[in-house]
Amino acid sequence: MNLDLLFKIAGVGILISVFHTALKQAGKEDMAHLCTLAGFAIVLLWVVQLLGQLFTTVQGVFKLF
Amino acid sequence: MEIIQIVGLGFIVTLLILIIRSQRPEIAVQLSLTLATIIFLLVLAKLDVVLNLFRELAEKASVSQTYLNTILKIIGIAYITEFGAQVCRDAGEGAVAAKIEFAGKILVMVMAVPIIALVLDTIVKLIP
């Protein structure tokens, strides 16, 4: 199963928070927010794909459609 | 075997969520959502086997498929509703979770109405 996705998301989360603080220290407040937003969008992309897979599987198993 | 893998995964990801929740709460919510989805996908394969067994038994007992399909649909709706409501409640949105559960109850009731009508008809026929 795609367990590596979990650790990828955790990695991206930690990286974002580090970048955010680093950029804020460097005085680039707007870049920090943009970087956080970008990381959030990437993680959202992975999560939405996984949710799509979950919902199609549930429809298949429970004959919901 | 399976359950040890799942529990271990749950612990690891819970600790990761704790680290991330202080800095980036929105990523923590997505992480817990991903974990819930992965665990359910792991278990779903086994659930499919059980449900197929129920279908075969229903055919042998010549129970009509509509009952079993409705029951399976209701179980599916109940599960997805609970999944969504719980994730929203974890993220701190109690009101959204309550609305999702409310919608789920209505949908289940809509599914159940034909069966209730059928049961009442059979009862009325039994009374001479």
Image (tube, rainbow, N blue to C red):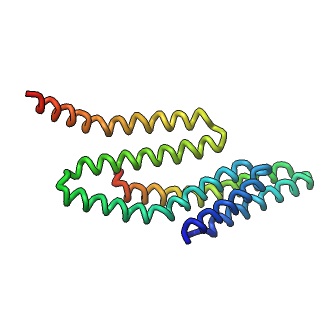
> Residue at 78% across / 61% down in the picture?
A15
Vertical placement of residue B57 versus B125, above or below? below
- How many marks are shown on the rendered structure? 0
The answer to whether B120 appears left or right of A1 in the picture is left
Q: Quadrant of the N terminus of chain B?
A: bottom right
The answer to whether A5 appears left or right of A10 in the picture is left
The answer to whether B113 appears left or right of B42 in the picture is left
Relative to the observer, which residue lies in front, B15 or A24?
B15
Q: Position of residue B120 (x, y in %)?
A: 20, 31
Q: Is residue A12 visible?
A: yes
> Residue at 54% across / 69% down in the picture?
B2
Relative to the observer, which residue lies in front, A41 or B11?
B11
The answer to whether B102 appears left or right of A60 in the picture is right
Q: Quadrant of residue A56?
A: bottom left
Q: Position of residue B37 (x, y in %)?
A: 55, 57
Q: Quadrant of residue B98?
A: top right
Q: Position of residue B110 (x, y in %)?
A: 33, 36
> Residue at 79% across / 51% down in the picture?
B23
Q: Quadrant of the C terminus of chain B?
A: top left
Q: Is residue A33 visible?
A: no
> Residue at 30% across / 46% down in the picture?
B70
Q: Position of residue B24 (x, y in %)?
A: 75, 51
Relative to the observer, which residue lies in front, A21 or B58?
B58
Q: Quadrant of residue B16?
A: bottom right
Relative to the observer, which residue lies in front, B110 or B59?
B59
